[in-house]
Amino acid sequence: MKISSFVHFARFGIKTILFKKREPILGTIIVTDKCNLKCKHCSVNNITAVMHPYKQIRNEMRQLYDMGVRILFFYGGETFLWEDGERTLRDLVVEAKKMGFLIVNTVTNGTFPIDLPEADLILLSLDGDRERHNIIRGDTYDTIMENVKQATSDNICFYMAINQINKDAVCDVCRTARDVQNVRAVSFNFHTPYPDTRELALSKEEKAKCCEDIVKMMKEGVPVFNLKSAFPYIIQNRFPTPCHQCVIMENGKISTCGRCIEIPGLCDECGYFFVAEYTLLFRGNIKIIFEMLKTYLKYI
Ligand SMILES: C[S@@+](CC[C@H](N)C(=O)[O-])C[C@H]1O[C@@H](n2cnc3c(N)ncnc32)[C@H](O)[C@@H]1O
Ligand code: SF4
Ligand code: SF4
């Protein structure tokens, strides 16, 4: 991370903590909800299947930038499906950088060739060893691993959503992240139980066991892009929600934290680690502040 970016985030953090401010710093734009997969745990694919036009997305970027957002995520649907004429996801990332966003990331299912060196991080969903990943995501594991190996840059971070199907595969994903070229780290979430996927949710005991596995892997030198100090809050769902420093934009509509904010009661069962990490950070949790500094400086 550049020193100037670090200074910007440090000033934002201090202001937010001292004055209990609610301005956003992290923004997500849904470029399309169209997807080539239909994963068992996912409730957000192909609802409209609309590709939002380049001009609209550029306006949304500008709007987020003007609100103070400096960490931008492109999200889907499948982000690598996005196109508008000749333009692809790469043009969006380049435009976001030009506009002044300090960190620009994208999230992908990894089934398309990966040529996106301009992104700071490409969060690539891997949901287990071959067997369990394929149960959740169809027969895609081998294609994804081939795309990872052929990627033109080493900015990939595996992204695993842990649920009833893959809860025993945490260590497999950790070891793959450690051993496969072009992968910088692995980051986790627990399943957030939307009304149509409640049966995939984990109990507190199961979440605790997964966190034990992650800590064990951290001790073995696996690069984990999460904060260990947040685990007790995540296991018990004891972190504040929603995250006021995070906003999401879909087709011109801005929501605080996630689109899921509209589902009654879901925030009490939120499985997204970033929500715990950011809300605890901005509440001034000292352990989280130091661990966040160490982790972000290492991986971005
Ligand atoms: C909605 S997908 C969009 C990007 C891309 N299609 C992909 O699969 O990475 C973003 C991430 O959300 C995760 N996800 C989907 N539904 C979830 C849920 N109910 N709880 C937690 N994570 C979920 C996916 O596994 C994926 O890592
Ligand atoms: S690839 Fe991503 S958006 Fe598509 S169904 Fe799977 S989790 Fe949902
Ligand atoms: S806190 Fe609520 S709005 Fe935010 S990601 Fe979790 S469920 Fe969604």
Image (cartoon, rainbow, N blue to C red):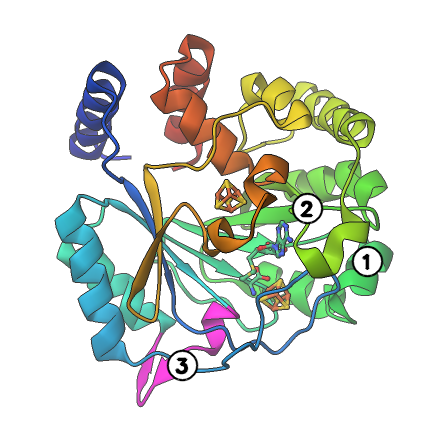
Element class at badge 2: loop
**Which numbered marker is on residue 26?**
none
Q: Nearer the viewer, residue 260 or 108?
A: 260
* Sequence-earlier tag: 2 or 1: 1
- Label 2 CB sits under 8 Å from any ligand 1 atom: yes
Mark closest to the chain's N terminus, 3 or 1: 3
Quick one: label 2, few (<14), some, or many (20+) residues within 10 Å?
many
**Looking at this view, is 125 or 241 the one in front?**
241
Residue at image location 60% in from the left, 48% down from the top: 159
Q: Which labelled disc corresponds to residue 130?
A: 1
Q: Residues within 10 Å of mark 3 (few under 14, many from 20)?
A: some
**Between disc 2 and disc 3, whose residue precedes?**
3
| Residue where numbered disc 3 is placed | 51
Judged left or right of residue 238, residue 190 is right
Report how far apart the C-alphas of labels 3 and 1 lie in the structure.
30 Å
* Ligand 2 shown in quarter: bottom right
Q: Are marks 2 and 1 in contact (CB under 8 Å)?
A: no
Start and end of the magenta stretch? 77-88
In the picture of the structure, the residue carrying the numbered disc 2 is 191
Between residue 31 and residue 263, name the one nearer to us. Answer: 263
The three-letter code of the residue at mark 2 reads His
Q: Are marks 2 and 3 in contact (CB under 8 Å)?
A: no
